[in-house]
Amino acid sequence: MKVKIIEREVMDPLADTSMDEIPVNSIGDAETISLLDNTKPGADIILRTVESELTGFNFIWSEKPAGAPAEAEQIDRAARGDLCILALGDCGSCTTWVILDAIRLEGMGVPTISICSDRFSGYARRLASAHGMPGLRIVEVEHPIAGLEPGAVRRKAEKIIPSLLDHLR
């Protein structure tokens, strides 16, 4: 059997860019929070925990397919809040689209908080920086989420509530 190995240089999609830094929107006094569920296993549990723990807010739910960009109507619904919390980035494609959807919302004037697992948060930050938003708010939830019982996901979600509240102050 023959194997032909060819080395090629490829562009790093997370390489430094010459883009100017784009500031994130200030959260301010949020009354309505939109929750954008990318339908990853556990994302709904995380967002329902957020909804139950963050009292005094109105909530708007929006859902999109995992591993794909939100469609215009899904982004428009998520943009109805004073703030959008997106979940869940816990693999390569899902993290990519959580961050890119957050950047789209920030571009529409909607402040965001993206929830990513601690295993993918570094990638999420590099991706946001590569797109000019190194200040994008990313909250880390303990990996893994997929495959866990709902109670275990809920307990992990409860641990991130203080980080979310820090962003809301």
Image (tube, rainbow, N blue to C red):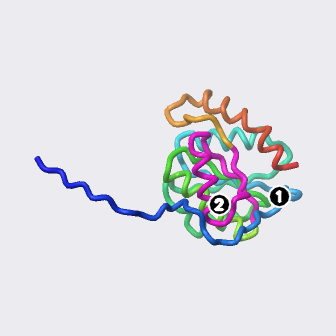
Asked whether 48 or 103 is in front, the reply is 103
Circle 2 residue: 129
Circle 1 residue: 27
The magenta stretch spans residue 48: no
In this figure, what is the number of numbered marks? 2
- Magenta segment range? 110-139
Relative to 50, 71 lies left or right: left
* Mark 1 residue element: loop
Q: CA distance from mark 2 to mark 1?
A: 20 Å
**Mark 2 Cα-neighbour bin, 10 Å: few <14, some 14–19, many ≥20:** many
Could you tell me the amino acid type at mark 2?
Answer: Ser
* Mark 2 residue element: helix
Q: Does residue 17 sit above or below 29 in this rendering?
A: below
Residue 16 at what x, y percent from top left? 59, 63
Question: What residue sits 50% from the left and 62% below the top?
Answer: 13
Question: What residue sits 72% from the left and 68% below the top?
Answer: 22
Residue 70 at what x, y percent from top left? 56, 62
